[in-house]
C-alpha cells in the first residue's frame, strides 16, 4: 500500500463533525450552523455552551436550568485547592491548569464512567471549574486566599470577581463574555485533535482535556497573545512602532526558510493555517480593544498594534489572527499577560467537551499511518564486529 505523507496533516480531513466549521477563504467561523458574528452580537457564553453541547439554542426554561447547573458546578474540592497551594509560585498558569485538570479527575464522582450521561455531567463540572482554577491560581501565587464562586453571577462576571476580588462593571463583564464566546470553539485545531485522539482510546474526559492543555502550551498553538503583549511593551510608544517592526521584518528576511520557523522569527498575532483573510474573531476583538483603550484613556497599545498591522499586512500579506487583539483587551482590563492562554482555555473548554462527547458517541480509534523514509533490509551486526 502506498502512503503519501502531508506535513502537519495540512488540509487532511481527519474527522466528521457537526460542531464547528471554519471557512478560511471567506473568513467565517460557524458554531452548529450559526455565524460567529451573529452569536457575538446576540448571544451569551452560557448559551453558546448549550449550543455546542446540545446542538441547538435553548428555550428560555432550558437556558435557565443550564445556567443554574453551570453555576453550581464551579467549586473546586478542598484537596485540589491544597494541591495548588503546594505548587511553586512561579509555575506558568497553563501548566497549573493542566495539572489541576488531571487532579480533578481523582475527585470527580463520574471519573471512570464514559457514558454520554456521565460525560455531560463531567463537562458541566469542568466548565465551571476551569474558570475557578485560573482565578484561584492567580490569587494563590500572590499569597492570597482563593475566593469562592458566586452562583448568582454570570460565568464571565464570576470569573472576573474571583480574579480581582470585586464586582466587575457591565463593560468588563460583556467584554469577557464576548471573549469567551469567540474562544469557545475552533474546529480541529491542535489541542482539539489531541483531546479527540485521547478520547478515541476510550480514556475519560479528564485525561482528554489534560492532553488538550498540553498541546495548547506549545508556542505554535497557544501563547501567541502573551508574545504579542511582550512585543508591544518592548516597542513602548507609537512613535517607535514602524521602525521597530520594519527592523524585525528586515532581520527576518535575512534568515533561511528553516530559521524563520523559529518562534523568535515569528510576528506574533499574524498568520493562520486555515484563514486566508482576517480571522473573523479578530474584528470583534479589535473593536473591543479600541473601545477599552479609549474608555481607559490609554490608547498607545492599540495605536502600536494598528501600525504593526498595517506594515505586516503590506509587507508579508499575513492576516491578523485571534491572538493579536485579545492581548490588549486583557491587558487593558488589568489581567496579567501570563494568564492570557489560560483565559483562552476558560473559553475553549466548552468546545473541547463537545468534541469529546461527539468522539465517544461515534468512536473509532484514531490511528493514522506514517510514511517511512528510513533504511531497509539492514543485516544485524554482532556488537563485537561493529
Image (cartoon, grey):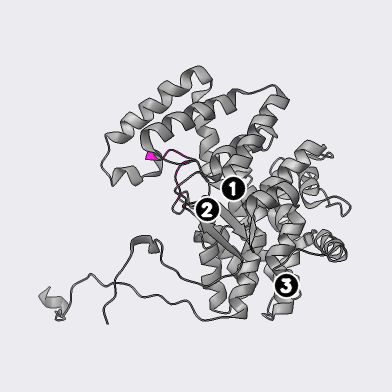
Q: Are marks 2 and 3 in contact (CB under 8 Å)?
A: no
Q: Is residue 56 left or right of residue 16?
A: right
The single residue placed furthest to the left in the displayed view is 385
Rendered location of residue 39, percent (x, y): 69, 52
Residue 226 falls in image quadrant: top right
Q: Is residue 20 left or right of residue 144?
A: left
Q: Is residue 105 above or below residue 302?
A: below
Nearer-N-terminus badge (2/1):
2
Magenta region: which residues? 265-272
Q: Which mark is residue 217?
A: 2
Q: Which mark is residue 356?
A: none
Helix, strand or loop at mark 3 = helix
Q: Is residue 55 above or below residue 344?
A: below
Q: Is residue 268 magenta?
A: yes
Rendered location of residue 127, percent (x, y): 72, 60
Residue 251 falls in image quadrant: top left
Nearer-N-terminus badge (3/1):
3
User: Marks 2 and 3, Cα distance to the nearest angstrom?
Assistant: 25 Å
Q: Is residue 330 above or below residue 22?
A: above
Helix, strand or loop at mark 2 = loop
Tag nearer the camera, 2 or 3: 3
Q: Are marks 2 and 1 in contact (CB under 8 Å)?
A: yes
Q: Which residue is mark 1?
A: 341
Q: Residue at x 35, y 46 (%)?
A: 261
Nearer-N-terminus badge (2/3):
3
Identify the image quadrant of the N terminus.
bottom left
Marker count (numbered):
3
Identify the image quadrant of the C terminus.
bottom left
Helix, strand or loop at mark 1 = helix
Q: Residue at x 15, y 78 (%)?
A: 378
Q: Which residue is mark 3?
A: 120
Q: Is residue 188 magenta?
A: no
Amino acid at each position: 500500500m502506498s502512503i503519501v505523507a502531508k506535513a502537519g496533516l495540512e488540509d487532511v480531513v481527519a474527522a466528521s463533525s457537526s460542531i464547528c466549521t471554519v471557512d478560511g477563504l471567506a473568513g467565517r467561523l460557524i458554531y452548529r450552523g450559526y455565524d460567529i458574528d451573529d452569536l457575538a452580537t446576540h448571544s451569551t457564553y452560557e448559551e453558546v455552551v448549550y449550543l455546542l453541547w446540545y446542538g441547538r439554542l435553548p428555550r428560555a426554561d432550558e437556558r435557565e436550568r443550564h445556567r443554574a447547573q453551570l453555576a453550581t458546578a464551579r467549586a473546586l474540592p478542598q484537596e485540589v485547592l491544597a494541591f495548588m497551594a503546594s505548587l511553586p509560585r512561579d509555575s506558568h498558569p497553563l501548566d497549573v491548569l493542566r495539572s489541576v485538570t488531571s487532579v480533578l479527575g481523582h475527585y470527580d464522582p463520574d471519573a471512570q464512567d464514559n457514558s454520554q450521561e456521565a460525560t455531560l455531567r463531567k463537562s458541566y463540572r469542568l466548565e465551571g471549574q476551569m474558570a475557578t482554577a485560573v482565578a484561584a491560581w492567580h490569587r494563590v501565587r500572590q499569597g492570597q486566599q482563593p475566593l469562592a464562586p458566586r452562583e448568582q453571577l454570570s460565568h464571565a462576571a464570576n470569573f472576573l470577581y474571583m480574579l480581582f476580588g470585586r464586582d466587575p462593571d457591565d463593560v468588563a463583564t460583556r467584554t469577557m463574555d464576548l471573549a469567551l464566546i469567540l474562544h469557545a470553539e475552533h474546529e480541529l485545531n491542535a489541542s482539539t485533535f489531541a483531546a479527540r485522539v485521547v478520547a478515541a482510546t476510550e480514556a475519560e474526559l479528564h485525561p482528554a482535556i489534560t492532553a488538550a492543555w498540553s498541546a495548547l502550551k506549545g508556542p505554535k498553538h497557544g501563547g501567541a497573545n502573551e508574545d504579542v503583549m511582550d512585543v508591544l511593551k518592548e516597542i513602548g510608544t507609537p512613535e517607535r512602532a514602524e521602525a521597530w517592526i520594519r527592523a524585525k521584518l528586515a532581520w527576518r528576511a535575512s534568515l533561511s526558510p528553516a530559521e524563520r520557523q523559529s518562534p523568535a522569527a515569528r510576528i506574533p498575532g499574524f498568520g493562520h493555517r486555515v484563514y486566508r483573510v482576517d480571522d473573523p474573531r479578530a474584528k470583534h476583538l479589535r473593536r473591543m480593544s479600541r473601545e477599552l483603550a479609549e474608555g481607559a484613556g490609554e490608547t498607545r497599545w492599540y495605536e502600536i498594534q494598528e501600525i504593526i498591522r498595517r506594515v505586516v499586512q503590506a509587507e508579508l500579506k499575513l492576516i491578523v489572527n485571534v491572538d493579536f487583539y485579545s492581548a490588549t483587551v486583557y491587558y487593558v482590563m488589568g489581567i496579567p499577560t501570563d494568564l492570557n492562554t489560560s483565559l483562552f482555555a476558560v473559553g475553549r473548554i466548552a468546545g473541547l467537551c463537545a468534541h469529546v462527547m461527539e468522539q465517544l458517541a461515534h468512536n473509532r480509534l484514531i490511528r493514522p499511518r506514517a510514511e517511512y523514509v528510513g533504511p531497509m533490509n539492514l543485516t544485524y551486526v554482532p556488537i563485537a564486529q561493529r
